[in-house]
Image (cartoon, grey):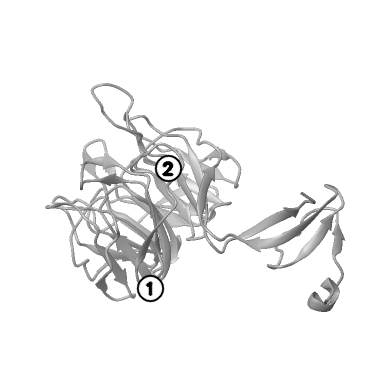
Amino acid sequence: MATYKEIFGTNIEVLSSDPSNPVEGQVWYNSTDNVVKGAAATTVGSWSTGGSLNTGRRSMSGAGTQTAALGIGGNSNPGSPPFSVEIANTESYDGTSWTEVNDLNTGRGSSAGDGTQTSALYFGGIVSTTRSVLTESWNGSNWTEVNDLNTARLALAGCGADNTSALAFGGNTPPVSALTENWNGTSWTEVNDLNTARQGLTGFGIVTSALATTGEDPTGRVALTEQWNGTSWTEVADTNSNREGAGAAGTDNTSGLIFGGFQQAPVDSRVNKTELWNGTSWSEEADLSGTTYMKQAGAGTATAALSFGGEGPSNEMRTGTEEWLGAGAPLTRTFTDS
């Protein structure tokens, strides 16, 4: 029988703390915890509770990763009968808790945004009753107003790698829109439209490889998905459930996640369903663990995502955060003798 050293070329290491980036199959002895640990990979995805936002809200945007995210803007619904108050707050997540950082110059919700915790873009939305063309750029410390969108709209979607490169697509101008615009770090340029105009859609990716999915067209909520190759949109496989106001996470048009939202058929209802995109088709995964909600924000990747904020079933403004650990994500296991 082969020994651990014969298989891996080294003895089990003795470390005072867990390694920051262990390789799957690596085993070590943690001398502080007095236990043997190993690096594994998850076999199925699941959601768990994370730190709560300081300010509950819906229709906000997210940027960054699961351990380094931004929650941007949004609106609240403070009374009965409902009315909205646009929020300028920005919060930063470190993997454990949210911290308030510098506000947007103009508070607004139903906007779109993406990027990283240190380089993000936020655009469109609604201010009071007026659809917005405003774009703001985040440098890790402050927001700066930059060149406007060509077309004012709310309930649009967006994606991008940082504040120098982004896509804005869909929304309500009115009416519902198929417009796509490309941000080059200085200005917006109109490019090829979506095949199906809609609002309340969601998406993920970068300017050369993006996905737009779900939303609401004039006939109702849809399950439509379109893939962007840097030049044009192509219709691909539908989601399993129609919805609008879903959250999303993903890095390109081959891998991503959507979660939550508001479903029209078979009955109008908020949903906690999660679906995973593998580049070809959607598969249903483990549901969000909390109460069903819509218009929440998302950040991260298909294997390590965040869902935060949103509106609950009694129109309450959610402060909760859930963290997704997808199949194949790294996981540290502790070995016991039982």
Give the x, y percent position of residue 190: 25, 67
For disc 2, the neighbor class at 10 Å (few under 14, some 14 to 19, many from 20) is many
- The residue nearer to you, when weighing 68 against 145, is 68
**Residue at 36% across, 34% down:** 312
Q: CA distance from mark 1 to mark 2?
A: 28 Å
Give the x, y percent position of residue 70: 50, 48
Q: Is residue 142 at least partly visible in the picture?
A: no
Dividing the picture into quadrants, the one containing residue 167 is: bottom left
Residue located beneath label 1 in the image: 208
**Residue at 46% across, 32% down:** 55
Q: Amino acid at mark 2?
A: Leu
Image disc number at residue 104: 2
> Where 50 falls versus 298 (above or below)?
above
For disc 1, the neighbor class at 10 Å (few under 14, some 14 to 19, many from 20) is some
Q: Is residue 172 at least partly visible in the picture?
A: yes
Say left or right for 183 vs 5: left
Q: Amino acid at mark 1?
A: Thr
